[in-house]
Amino acid sequence: MKVSVIGTGYVGLVTGACLADMGNDVVCLDIDARKIAILREGGIPIHEPGLDTLVQHNAQAGRLHFTTDAREAALHADIHFIAVGTPPDEDGSADMKYVLAAAREVGRHMNRYCVIVNKSTVPVGTAQKVRAAVAEELAARGADIRFSVVSNPEFLKEGAAIEDFMRPDRIVVGSDDEQATRIMRELYAPFERNTPKVLVMDIASAELTKYAANAMLATRISFMNEMALLAEVLGADIDAVRRGVGSDPRIGSHFLYAGCGYGGSCFPKDVAALSRAAGDAGISMGVLDAVEAANERQKELLIARIEARFGHDLGGRVFALWGLAFKPGTDDMREAPSQVVVRALVKRGATVRAYDPVATDEARRVLADVAGSVEYQSHAMDALKGADALVVVTEWKEFRSPDFDHIKSLLRKPIIFDGRNIFSPEAARQAGFEYTGIGRA
Ligand code: UDX
């Protein structure tokens, strides 16, 4: 099928590459000429395992093209995916200006029936706004062309996005029009592999599903983070509690890991946007506000622990920090707990010696305001040399089999603050460490 994907960010690029890999003819459009130039030269502007090969392979096969020309994309495709950003407004609600601008571009140039698909995370009611924007553009040039708008939210996890797209748990399609539903079913049929995956529903429900899914996951994490604080005080171990509750199939074992807070491009933004939208609709969602507040508190937890151990004034101290990305498998620093930890350490006078397998460049950019007090290292062990303590912020796999003796020999003091509970407290203590995890008495 002929597809265009508007926006070559994380979601757009994965969508475009995966649809091309299934044999569709895909044009990816972006207004950012720099990104398009990188993609045309066979590079990719983000870090996502396997994406570079997938993009190169399909580009070489002639199924994946990149352009900055909105007209070219509009004329090419029968299905247009809108996958542009929806950054938070000042009040936390999602800013729709890029989505609507993309819709207008389609309306300005389209020359035949097409399906316009909202892939971006958008508030309930956006499909109607997209429809109105396209209709206005068509009316302005006196064109009488039919089109459909559907909602098809993404559920991609960074670091596993290709697998998530290729083998989805479900494909949510919000549609109120049979022709569009048929086209979407046909597009996604190859991804179903004998098991029905497409869930067709009304548009509002599809739009809300995305927010509800992310808010539910964020709620589980904040719940477990609060439970961890309680576990510590009561002398329990959150990891044992996690195994205990997670083995109930009604609860399930995913997203129950306590830590130093969730980050990323979705959870913080979507929880805030949903809360805001609910408020506008006259529904106060106290649960969501608590989820967010608990997460903010959780991001400060490591600092509170460090202060309790070393005092408020950290002048002259050096902290080794393992992990900067908001989670393993990505170089994404958006809303990363590491940002809170690094800035707080620097503010109290400390130097941070940081190591991350892939996010260093991104961290340099995002943490430019504290550049003078952060030294980035190319090896995990180098970050430890002469540091007062090791602080683990992101649970990269390579940190999981620690050589405690080696770590101890490099640190000035054998102290570990484990913000992701990746080490065994017993093993660390036996090796002579002062070990503090999250929720482990
Ligand atoms: C999320 C959703 O999972 C995905 O479906 C949606 O499309 C986009 O948002 P992502 O932001 O890539 O994906 O990250 P995810 O793996 O969900 O993790 C989010 C944050 O929660 C990370 O900071 C992670 O460290 C944290 N987390 C996750 C926990 O603290 N505990 C857990 O048990 C799980």
Image (spheres, rainbow, N blue to C red):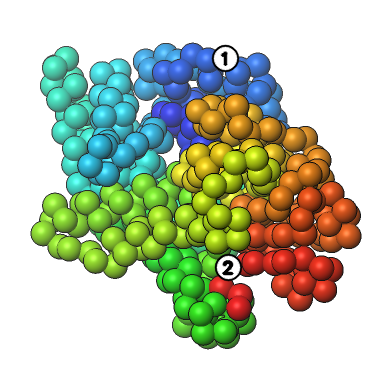
Residue 58 in the image, given as x and y percentages of width and height: 65, 30
Q: Which image quarter: residue 406? A: bottom right
In percent of the image, x 31 and y 29: which residue is there? 98
The residues bearing labels 1 and 2 have C-alpha atoms spaced at a distance of 44 Å
Which SS class for mark 1?
helix
Assign a secondary structure to mark 2.
Answer: loop
Q: Quadrant of residue 143?
A: top left
Residue 103: numbered disc: none
Q: Is residue 121 left or right of residue 255?
A: left
Given residues 262 and 389, the one toward you in this image is: 389
Could one spot residue 173 in this view of the protein? no
**What amino acid type is highlighted by mark number 2?**
Ile
337 with respect to 426 (left or right): left
Q: Position of residue 362 (x, y in %)?
A: 59, 31
Query: Does the numbered disc 2 mark a residue whose Cβ is under 8 Å from ligand 1?
Result: no
Q: Nearer the viewer, residue 129 or 238?
A: 238
Residue, disc 2: 438
Q: Residue at horizontal 26%, vertical 18%?
A: 108
The residue identified by callout 1 is: 37
In percent of the image, x 70 and y 53: which residue is there?
A: 389
Q: Amino acid at mark 1?
A: Ala
Q: Nearer the viewer, mark 1 or mark 2?
A: 2
Neighbourhood count class around disc 1 (C-alpha, 10 Å): few under 14, some 14–19, many 20 upward: some
Q: In the image, what residue occupies the spot 60% across and 27% down?
A: 372
